[in-house]
Amino acid sequence: MVSEWQFEVPTAGSKLLPPDGRYMEALSSQGYGFEVAIADLVDNSIDAGAENVLIHFLRDGEQLVSLVVVDDGKGMGEEDLDVAMTVGGRRGYDEKSLGMFGTGLKSASLSHANSLTVVSRTKRTRPVGRRWLMERAKHGFECDIIDADYAQDFVDFYQGCPIFFQGTIVRWDGVKDFPRHGGGGQTDRYLHRSVNKLGLHLGLYLHRFLARDDFHITISVQDVRTGVEYANYGVESLDPFAYPVSGDSTYPSTFTADVADLGPVRLDAHVWPPRSSLDEYKAFGTVLDREGFYFYRNDRLVQAGGWNNFRQPEQHLALARVAIDLPNDPEATVFRLTVKKEGVQASPEFIGSLEDAKDDQGRTFARYVDDAERVYREARKRAGVARKAVVPPGHGIDPQVRQVIEEELPVLAHADPLNFRWQKLSNDKFFEIDQDAHVLLLNQHYRAALLGGRDGSLNDAPMVKSLMYLLMKDAFQSERVGSRLKDNIELWQSVLVAAARAELDRVAD
């Protein structure tokens, strides 16, 4: 028992405790999403002054083999490359740089690949290369030196693509996200899905750079043996504030929050027009994900939506978006950026300052939030929409379908989501209801027929599940199912079993 509290903890010396080799394994287990990891590599290219970045998916027939990111930035000599490949290596970041911690290249890459190779050259130096192998890195800190002839050949391979007089090539091998077996069209489906998601992510988070005339990102898919290029397209800017006409003619407006220990912070508050179909409004996240604060650091979007404990998200605020360029905060006392640069932790001082934030018309920030909600509600009334609130869609429903449901129907804020799961049931049942677990069980016996020979996945059969959600959502809104709904459930059960058996007969024929 301490007899008296001591504000300073006394010490009796110090000792050096270097990290264990497993530190590399821990570093690569930070939960980087695939698109987030690629964006981190592109950040490095921007910091290097690149005007062109190529993201190259390489396949050998049906098998994806490597992913390569090429830029025409200033490149690195041997000493700078060693620093770049050092965990926590400092490069003397410029205050306008996107890099911060000296870990992004390594942690982002080794989160998704078993091997990271970097080859680079400047105007004055020959190509040099280094490689981290995850299997070796987690047992020690020995980084491979790439053979000089291979480094030159690798640079020559990308000569002119983009114009590569200088720059850097990052290569991933053993990519964990790639399908292990590419047959049956798996590789094509993976590429279609992944390239689209990657393009949207980069288009959003780097939209200010992509809007410039001097910066371009290209995504390409090519066969390493035949040289055939399967796809090649430029990433387009996806500006989350690019609406044609404001939803409220008195917005956008700039509010100023006076934050203790930091000073004034500018908030550019926007109101999107209701029911927009533009990609800039609806191409990413759910309706609840997209509202709120959009934080930028050095023109790079580092958080797209969310209220940072200012308030809970709700559908009626779907049109509210606030752009905030993070001020210089070297001690990170008010705003802390996550290592992955996909979120901002805001201090209570910032949240408290929003209560007194005003624009040049004297309106409070709370008034802005009310105005955004009013525009949303009035648009619903004009459309004659008075839809009943529903339980949110959950696991098992395709994210695109979930997004539309949440845009079209008011969602019960604190209700458990309705999840879907395939399970073995009696063949005279197409589905069962588990109210306690909030799960709608679908009969595994009919799954293959409904998928038409396609492989099953968590979010498969989106048409069937969407219809089932619309039919069954009321059954999960109350503790007991009324007699009318019970009768409807029996009817739907009979019809759906008959339809599923008809699908089985067609497959058999």
Image: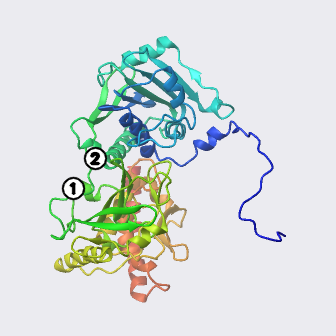
Q: CA distance from mark 1 to mark 2?
A: 11 Å
Tell which residue pokes out farthest to the bottom in this image.
483
Tag on residue 242? Answer: 1
- Label 2: how many residues lie within 10 Å, few (<14), some (14-19) or many (20+)? some
- Res 322 → quadrant: bottom left
Expressed as whole percent of the image width and height from the top left, the position of residue 498 reads 39, 66
Name the residue nearer the viewer: 442 or 500.
442
Give the answer, above or below, for where 436 lies relative to 50: below
For the point 63% across and 40% down, which residue is it?
Answer: 25
Q: Quadrant of the N terminus?
A: bottom right
Expressed as whole percent of the image width and height from the top left, the position of residue 87 reads 58, 36
Expressed as whole percent of the image width and height from the top left, the position of residue 223 reads 37, 25
- Res 385 → quadrant: bottom left
Hey, what amino acid is under mark 1? Ala
Hey, what amino acid is under mark 2? Arg
Q: Write down the residue under mark 2.
A: 208
- Res 397 → quadrant: bottom left
Mark toward the viewer: 1 or 2 = 2
Can residue 310 be seen in the rendering of this structure? no
Tell which residue pokes out farthest to the top in this image.
149
Residue 117 appears left or right of 59: right
Expressed as whole percent of the image width and height from the top left, the position of residue 356 reads 36, 75
Name the residue nearer the viewer: 192 or 426.
192
Can residue 54 be seen in the rendering of this structure? yes
Give the answer, above or below, for where 184 lies relative to 414: above
Q: Earlier in the sequence, mark 1 or mark 2?
A: 2
- Is label 2 in a helix, a strand or a loop? helix
For the point 40% across and 41% down, which residue is it?
Answer: 97
